[in-house]
Amino acid sequence: MEGSTLHEYVRIIATLLLDGIVLAIGLLLISLVVMYFIDITQTKHAVRRNYPVVGRFRYLFETLGEFFRQYFFAMDREEMPFNRAERSWVYRAAKDIDSTVPFGSTRSLNPPGTVIFVNTAFPNLHEESIAPESLVIGPDCEHPFETNSIFNISGMSYGAISKPAILALSQGAKAAGCWLNTGEGGLSPYHLEGGADLVVQIGTAKYGVRDESGNLSDAKVKELAALPQVKMFEIKLSQGAKPGKGGMLPGEKVSEEVARIRGIPAGKDSLSPNRHRDIDSVQDLLDTVNKIRASTGKPVGFKLVLGDVSFLDDLCNAIAERGIESAPDFITLDSADGGTGAAPQSLIDYMGLPLRESLPLLANALIRHDLKRRIRIIASGKLIEPASVAWAISLGADFVVSARGFMFALGCVQAMQCNRNTCPTGIATHDPKLQKGLVVEDKAKRVEHYCRNVNYEVGVIAHSCGVSDPRRLCRNHARIICDNGLSMSIADLHPIPAEAD
């Protein structure tokens, strides 16, 4: 009896499985027939119309190819915009684990443009190291900003990135002793919550400091300046990834809260003008700098990506005519290969000068006009690891800022979905289901560790070059590979102006 019952159970299960398989095959065949008729009747995709059903695999493989290249096919030093070796260093530094590598470097020294540093025969001992020099930004301001922070967090707007991402950056910046730039999206409560020093960026749309007509509101600027955490104001003229184009925030990212902070309608695409409507010349720029500085008492500078280099002499000559007190307190120089959440490919690929060319041009212009000690240079654009930071300092930068480096510290995997609200790590999305993956307390620690480890490794490079303070790195300390495969000193490639003091 028991045997027959078991046999009956087996028969029933086998029948159900067979029925399930038949049903699945039937549904599959029906689906294929439906897709076939859809493909041969649609008019938008020629491949699908000519090769119904099969042609769909082309689009599937195109989508999957991006991920296969990243994880299986691209070599450690090949991927763009950041290769696996660079990202891996940031991940290890952020986790504060061993960042040493074995056997030998995988970085080729042959490609022209490769930077190498010049070690001295008698490097500084570890115990001879000193803390980086403190620098004053805006010495003539009522409230100057003094800091010894070399590596800082560049502008990332609330809205472009999520609430937990901003909270982690704010808390991590406070612990590391660096500053955090708000980005052009305005000052949110989450920027303030961590207690970090803040740089308020004023973009072309004047988000957060605009009146009902979209013009700069003096009252709102003063209100922000009264906050002790707000140390400086940065006027954003242009961004490396999209010079001549304003910020772009898709409507699905413009929540009620983002809209309230920015002063714009919720749920609609947020497009900034391609320039400040009230800044049409060097004189207008200096007027705005001095207006904000006079009303706030705090340092004011501007951010741009350099293109037309005649702008630099025009600026310096205008300052000479007005008096050195009219000079901006800092210039943030972005690189043509800077990052963004969204930009037209024509601009992101072809517009503006890269930092390797624009940084020495800016530094030399300030030196020629005897303004280098007055105007601090903040370098930005793909400077995510210690060697690139040390290189920028040696060329004349006083500070370095990074956005994408700190995104990697937060857990960014370079999924390239910043503009879709589908960021898988919860950084560049307002989807609560995706944001839950970003644990603020853990990521804040990673931000702190990353910042501290970059500064430490920059110090290691400085000691090897024979200087005790990274800010004493100069052009003689770095060389660059030329077309003939040999290197030349950056001091010879970009000589200091002969009339320099």
Image (spheres, rainbow, N blue to C red):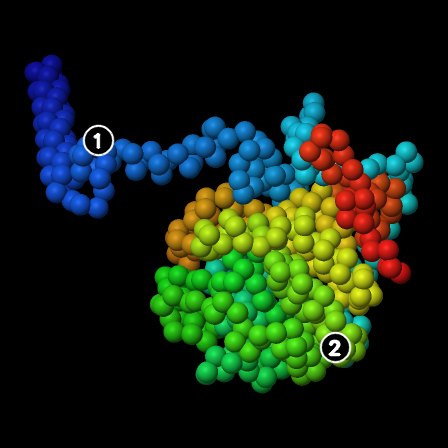
Mark 1, residue position:
54
Label 1 Cα neighbours within 10 Å, binned few <14 / some 14-19 / many ≥20 = some
Q: Residue 373 has which mark? A: none
> Viewer-proximal residue, 351 or 217?
351
Residue 454, given in percent of the width and then of the height, sits at 70, 46
Numbered disc 2: secondary structure? helix
**Label 2 to label 1, Cα distance in Å?**
67 Å
Q: Which residue shows up at 90% across the image and 45% down it? A: 128
- Which quarter of the figure is the N terminus placed in? top left
What amino acid type is highlighted by mark number 1? Val
Mark 2, residue position:
326
Quadrant assignment, res 279:
bottom right
Count of marks overlaid on the render? 2
26 relative position to 160: left or right? left
Dot placed on the residue nearer the N-terminal end, 2 or 1: 1
Q: Residue 303, relative to residue 54: is it above or below? A: below
- Closer to the observer: label 2 or label 1? 2
